[in-house]
Image: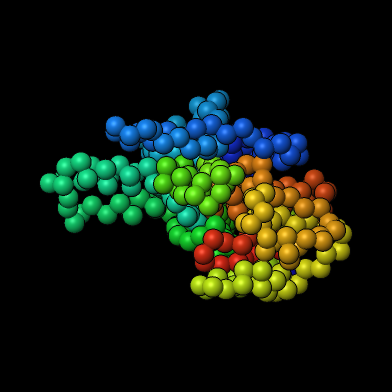
Amino acid sequence: MTRITITGTGAVTPAGWGVAEMMKALDEGVRIVPGELVRERGEAEAMVTPVLRVPPGAATAALPKSPRLRRVSPVSKFAVGAAVEALGPERMAKVAAGELRLGIVCPLMNGCVNYSNRFFGEVLADPSVASPILFPETVFNAPASHLSALFGSTAPNDTLLGDTAEIYTALEIATEWLLRGDCDGVLVVAPEELDWLSAEALQLYSSGAVAAEGAAALYLEIDGAGPELVCVPDPVALVPGCDRGAALREIFAASGVLDDGATLLADSRSGIARFDRAEDGVFGGWSGPRVSVRKVLGESFTASSGLQLVVAVQAILRGDAERALVATLGGNEQAAACVMRR
């Protein structure tokens, strides 16, 4: 019987570069102290917003030396850092030698906002440079493009735009590519970078909602040594005015998981009561282990949902749980989940 397995993970978070740093922060359970994002407003007082940044350090210097990375924005650096960790040097060498066909899927919500801001900023400052050839939205493809170029991959490459639950669609695409024989392995990489617009918007909903940056990566292959991806139920659409709790209950039922005390729940709670109300209502009495990455690492949108998956894989590998239910209640698109087991 064919098994889709997750045999590599990577993470770049406000806790540091690497899965080990992320797991240490989550095990300690202490929220990282935020820094500040300052937006100058001419003669008006500057806008100061709390944010959680990825710390610079030796890991950034250890990124592969490539002309493609010379002028990239943070989102692509985070994507590369997580992807390199998930893939590992042996697989990287095989991809470069043409011995391993590597597919890449990048789900994003904000994406390459710094590049887009720069393009729009130039036009606003000087409308004479406006041109139909300027399509800032195309830079959403930059992280996925940089990854394929860096690894020398000619296998399928795709970028998905959606809310924070879009990564589950990426898992479905990765599974389809593997079962069809399009690839030998697939990297699912969810990177996000900070920008003032989303950071300030979060604060309008709650002063406790702190935007973060980073990336999560998972390497999937057939019949590998890692945890098995058992199922990815069809997502439940969040139509306007819907009952978000009902959507979450529907996806929970579709997963087929029972709270048996040995199943980990990796949820999308942020620690803000009104944001978490639906999840607390559906999973409030969960008897097994439970982890909420956003409570410690902030809201990095699609990257946070990727980190939910990474922490579930790590928990299974450490023996903390036999099985994991990973569930994300998206912002305005879908409720989605997946199940993995040892």
Residue at x 38% of width, y 35% of height: 39
Q: Quadrant of residue 13?
A: top right
161 and 120: which one is in front?
120
42 and 69: which one is in front?
42
Give coordinates of residue 227: x percent, y percent. 73, 56
Q: Is residue 162 left or right of residue 19?
A: left
Image quadrant occupied by the C terminus: bottom right
Vertical comparison of 62 with 304: above or below: above
Give coordinates of residue 207: x percent, y percent. 56, 44
Residue 325, can we see it? no
Image quadrant occupied by the N terminus: bottom right
Q: How many marks?
A: 0
Residue at x 66% of width, y 73% of height: 246
Residue at x 12% of width, y 46% of height: 128
Q: How is the image coloured?
A: rainbow
Residue at x 57% of width, y 34% of height: 34
